[in-house]
Image: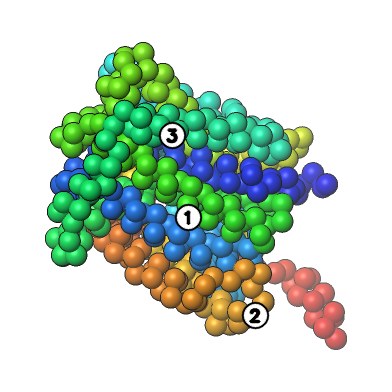
């Protein structure tokens, strides 16, 4: 193995573990109350189901692209290939451009959520909360500063912790709660009206955030064993598994706590366990939730650290980000940069809800919608016969994904929509300035190329 080349060491089990730990994180524990409040009643379960459906549809897009281009960087490669020689460089640049801010925001959201739930164990003032979230980011960077085969094993360990925590919460509701009641009550207020659709859209901006990460394996494509099969498999296994866990967890909590208590609680899962099994059990489950949050930051940081590396190695970003560690063979410059920005964000932002909406607003246009449209263009140019993995009922899932993502983009709020558009516009300007300032081929090189063509 060359010292400057990433190697295929991550198995299907490890890839699934990386996806699922990234998906769960602190999200479902923090936004559960907010989703219930947004839906104005017990029908909040439908918001979690809707998030799963969108994730599954979108995963078909990721699967075709991930299996076709199993490289480091994920969407960077998908956009470059999808939009072709003329527009691919701009589309992929805009993705990397937003990733340099969006990826630290994802890491920050998990770190802030960690600090928020830590407040159940030890009451924290604002300064102490920022110190906790900042320390989480630093520890993650230290933990990731090692070889990928070691990280794969760590991911499986963290994944076991995630499953154990979810199993405890779900099992408690099954044993002690009225598990059927929330399912029956979910239809209260449910109806296919514009008002319900609006509530569902706003709630989905939070539930979709809790599903994000099912594609993390695509960022590590060059490090996945048998990627044409394992990349799609790991995504669909992750989405189905996490959807079942999320639905069961929400039903479990709602089977014990009344709707009003769910809406008002900052630590709803901890208080749920405390109600059933006492204060000590509440402390233990909180520790496990913090473990899950830490695991999520670990997995997300791992995947995103490969994006600037892939772009730099391709000559489309600053060369320094293409460097691999001389002995541990991982993109350490990219890791340190994203970790540093995330640390700054973690001690700056206060409200995790604002971070969640900002994440979606920045990503939807330049990543989710852009690469779905890019897949349509790619298939038009090359045909579908060459694809190693093909979705069912093409192009219906692709078109459905674009429509739903655009609706969610609008639901993030007017100000964030404007901010996202301005950020994209700024990226376009930076790209063309960068291209204008880039040195062209030397006369000697042109003469050499001319001779080769003779």
Characterize the local packing of mark 2: few (<14), some (14-19) or many (20 or more) Cα atoms within 10 angstroms.
few
Q: CA distance from mark 3 to mark 2?
A: 41 Å
Q: Is residue 259 left or right of 283 when viewed as pictured?
A: left
Q: Nearer the viewer, mark 3 or mark 2?
A: 3
Q: Dot 2 corresponds to which residue?
A: 385
Tag 3 near tag 2, CB within 8 Å? no
Q: Which is more toward the observer, 359 or 438?
A: 359
* Earlier-in-chain disc, 1 versus 3: 1
Task: Give the residue at x 51% y 27%.
Answer: 138
Q: Name the residue located 58 percent from the left edge and 71 percent from the top edge.
A: 390
Instruction: Point out the frontmost of discs 1 and 2.
Output: 2
* Label drawn at residue 166: 3
Residue at 45% across, 25% down: 288
Q: Earlier in the sequence, mark 3 or mark 2?
A: 3
What is the distance, in whole Å, between disc 1 and disc 2 at their CAs? 33 Å
Q: Quadrant of residue 343?
A: top left
The disc label shown at residue 97, or none: 1
- Count of numbered circles on the image: 3
Q: Nearer the viewer, residue 131 or 48?
A: 48
Does the CB distance between marks 1 and 3 fall below 8 Å? no
- The residue tagged with tag 2: helix, strand or loop? loop
Mark 3 crowd level (few <14, some 14–19, many ≥20, 10 Å Cα):
many
Distance Cα–Cα, label 1 vs label 3: 35 Å
Q: Quadrant location of residue 260? A: top left
Q: Secondary structure at mark 3?
A: helix
- Give residue 453's position: percent from left, percent from top: 82, 83
């Amino acid at each position: 193995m060359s010292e400057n080349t990433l190697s295929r060491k991550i198995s299907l089990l490890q890839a699934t573990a990386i996806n699922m730990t990234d998906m769960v994180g602190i999200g479902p524990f923090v936004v559960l109350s907010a989703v219930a409040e947004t839906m104005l009643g017990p029908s909040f379960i439908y918001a979690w189901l809707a998030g799963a459906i969108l994730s599954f549809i979108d995963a078909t897009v990721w699967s075709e692209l991930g299996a076709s281009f199993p490289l480091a960087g994920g969407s960077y490669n998908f956009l470059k290939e999808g939009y072709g020689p003329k527009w691919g460089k701009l589309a992929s640049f805009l993705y990397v451009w937003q990733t340099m801010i969006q990826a630290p925001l994802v890491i920050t959201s998990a770190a802030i959520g960690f600090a928020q739930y830590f407040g159940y164990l030890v009451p924290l003032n604002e300064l102490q909360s920022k110190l906790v979230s900042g320390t989480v980011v630093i520890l993650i960077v230290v933990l990731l500063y090692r070889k990928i085969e070691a990280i794969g094993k760590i991911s499986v360990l963290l994944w076991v912790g995630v499953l154990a925590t979810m199993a405890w919460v779900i099992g408690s509701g099954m044993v002690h709660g009225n598990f059927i009641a929330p399912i029956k009550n979910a239809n209260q207020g449910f109806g296919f009206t514009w008002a319900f659709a609006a509530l569902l859209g706003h709630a989905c901006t939070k539930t979709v955030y809790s599903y994000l990460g099912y594609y993390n394996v695509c960022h590590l494509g060059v490090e996945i064993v048998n990627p044409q099969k394992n990349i799609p498999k790991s995504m669909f296994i992750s989405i189905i598994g996490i959807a079942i866990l999320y639905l069961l967890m929400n039903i479990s909590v709602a089977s014990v706590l009344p709707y009003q208590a769910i809406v008002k609680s900052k630590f709803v899962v901890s208080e749920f366990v405390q109600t059933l099994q006492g204060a000590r059990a509440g402390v233990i489950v909180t520790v496990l939730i913090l473990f899950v949050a830490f695991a999520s930051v670990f997995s997300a940081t791992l995947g995103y650290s490969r994006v600037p590396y892939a772009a730099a190695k391709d000559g489309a970003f600053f060369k320094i980000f293409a460097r691999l560690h001389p002995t541990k063979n991982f993109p350490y410059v990219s890791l340190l940069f994203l970790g540093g920005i995330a640390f700054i964000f973690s001690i700056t932002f206060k409200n995790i809800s604002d971070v969640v909406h900002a994440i979606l607003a920045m990503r939807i246009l330049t990543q989710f919608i852009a690469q779905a449209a890019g897949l349509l263009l790619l298939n038009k140019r090359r045909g579908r016969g060459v694809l190693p993995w093909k979705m069912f009922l093409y192009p219906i899932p692709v078109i459905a994904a674009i429509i739903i993502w655009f609706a969610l983009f609008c639901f993030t709020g007017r100000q964030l929509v404007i901010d996202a558009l301005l950020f994209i516009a700024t990226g376009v300007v930076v790209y063309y300035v960068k291209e204008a300032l880039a040195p062209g081929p030397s006369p000697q090189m042109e003469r050499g190329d001319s001779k080769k063509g003779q």
